[in-house]
């Protein structure tokens, strides 16, 4: 359909189609086309656009849409306000998410409460998420299944094992919510993070639903963290049956072997990956600067300013070494020389994005990164030091959770 022949329904249909298929960049492209022909968006349009901004971490663009929302009077639309809460939470701007929530006043819905609870929990503000849930209960609002995932997630990341089980029981008894696999997975994570890995395994084998690959993967991650080799192998065997060839599982098992000093097994596992043609999913990182979103992949030299970016990476590496940083080359799943491993770590996509942001943004401005994979342990150590050396807050949203790096520390307390 020609651009000028479209009506609001057709514009929104296009936006919704792209959004439903996980294509946020196309959503934003269509939105710009829509504005280019002076077609006024409605609340449905805005929700799609804000959702797309949240997906790729386009905070500055989301703020511009927020200004438009206030200008045209859509701020009282609860769907739009909920989308704004989700945007700010997913971009790591928790204070803005809270502000929108407060400004909604009596217009808040269960979705509003849930969005902020989940957002707080994901950003590492577990206690605040639980306090908000208590307030929600005092308001006599009934939580949803998703609300309870946020509550259990908050307990897990705060180490509140007893509280987690109490909320889990109340979910069934007080609100009649039957546990889904997501809730059960949270309980496994809760026990695993607390170091109670054997109890986590017992919980899995007695849970009322058939444990899926995500549940066993959670256990394997806990085993790697707490050096539980026997149970780690059990989890690995189940994962091979349920989701063979998943590269992330090989990484977790390799981390477990490395943690217990089984370097020969690490080497064998890497050879197995090559033989079975198991390849790690390519990692990419997004960073937004001056209303544009830039994408980087490992070793990327396609950017027109790549020479300056790599010079900045070299400067970062030198300054980190002065701070005592030693690359954790056990994180590199490749049979290459030690020096090459250090180089491979230094060129991970999130480090390229951070180097670019340090070059192009003003001192003191937070740097926000979105990565499609779980951050490796070495990058986590390095970024903690970068936040200290360069005096920047660095917020990374990886596949696992948010990491707020500041002053040499991370909000995840080194467990993610």
Image (spheres, helix red, strand yellow):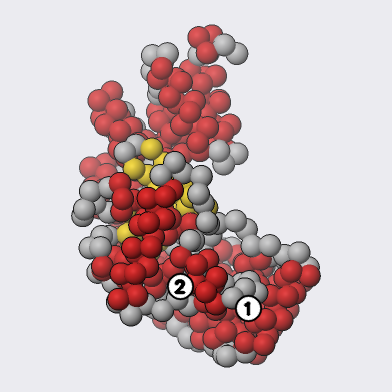
Q: Secondary structure at mark 1?
A: helix
Instruction: Name the spot of residue 387 as percent of width and height, x first.
Output: 29, 65
Determine which of the numbered discs, if any, sits on residue 253 in the image: 1
Pinpoint residue 192: horizontal percent, then vertical percent. 51, 80
**How far from the left and from the top, in percent, is residue 146?**
48, 56
Q: Residue at x 62, y 67 (%)?
A: 248
* Residue 216 visible somewhere in the drawing: no
Q: Residue at x 37, y 50 (%)?
A: 308
Q: Nearer the viewer, residue 310 or 144?
A: 310
Q: Depth check: give the residue in front, 326 or 315.
A: 315
Task: Give yes or no for contact between labels 2 and 1 (Cβ–Cβ under 8 Å).
Answer: no
Residue wearing tag 2: 378
Q: Quadrant of residue 164?
A: bottom left
Rendered position, 200 above or below 301: below
Residue at left offset 47%, top offset 52%: 285
Along the viewing direction, whichever of 170 and 379 lies nearer the viewer: 379
| Residue drawn 56% across the image and 26% down it | 14
């Amino acid at each position: 359909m020609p651009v000028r022949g479209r009506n609001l329904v057709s514009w929104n249909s296009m936006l919704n189609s792209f959004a439903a298929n996980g294509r946020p960049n196309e959503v934003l492209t269509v939105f710009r086309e829509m504005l280019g022909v002076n077609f006024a968006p409605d609340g449905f349009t805005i929700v799609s656009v804000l959702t797309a901004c949240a997906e790729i971490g386009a905070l500055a663009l989301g703020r511009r849409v927020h200004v438009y929302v206030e200008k045209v009077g859509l701020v009282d639309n609860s769907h739009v306000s909920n989308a704004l809460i989700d945007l700010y939470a997913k971009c790591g701007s928790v204070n803005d998410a809270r502000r929108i929530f407060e400004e909604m006043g009596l217009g808040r819905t269960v979705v509003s409460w849930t969005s902020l609870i989940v957002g707080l929990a994901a950003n590492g503000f577990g206690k605040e998420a639980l306090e908000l849930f208590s307030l929600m209960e005092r308001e006599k609002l009934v939580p949803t299944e998703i609300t309870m995932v946020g509550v259990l997630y908050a307990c897990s990341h705060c180490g509140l094992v007893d509280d987690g089980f109490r909320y889990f029981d109340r979910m069934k008894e007080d609100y009649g919510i039957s546990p889904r696999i997501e809730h059960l997975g949270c309980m496994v994570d809760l026990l695993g993070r607390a170091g109670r890995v054997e109890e986590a395994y017992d919980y899995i084998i007695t849970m009322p639903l058939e444990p899926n690959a995500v549940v066993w993967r959670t256990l394997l991650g806990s085993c790697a963290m707490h050096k539980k080799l026997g149970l780690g192998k059990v989890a690995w065997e189940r994962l091979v049956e349920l989701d063979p060839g998943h590269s992330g599982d090989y990484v977790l098992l390799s981390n477990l072997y490395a943690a217990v000093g089984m370097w020969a097994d690490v080497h064998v596992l890497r050879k197995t990956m090559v033989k079975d043609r198991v390849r790690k999913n390519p990692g990419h990182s997004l960073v937004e600067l001056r209303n544009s979103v830039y994408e980087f992949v490992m070793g990327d030299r396609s950017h027109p300013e790549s020479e300056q970016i790599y010079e900045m990476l070299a400067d970062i590496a030198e300054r980190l070494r002065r701070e005592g940083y030693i690359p954790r080359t056990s994180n590199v799943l490749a049979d290459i020389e030690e020096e090459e491993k250090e180089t491979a770590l230094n060129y991970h996509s999130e480090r390229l994005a951070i180097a670019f942001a340090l070059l192009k943004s003003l001192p003191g401005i937070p740097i926000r990164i979105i990565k499609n994979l779980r951050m490796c342990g070495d990058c986590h150590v390095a970024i903690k030091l970068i936040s200290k050396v360069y005096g920047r807050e660095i917020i990374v949203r990886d596949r696992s959770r948010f990491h707020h790096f500041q002053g040499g520390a991370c909000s995840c307390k080194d467990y993610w």
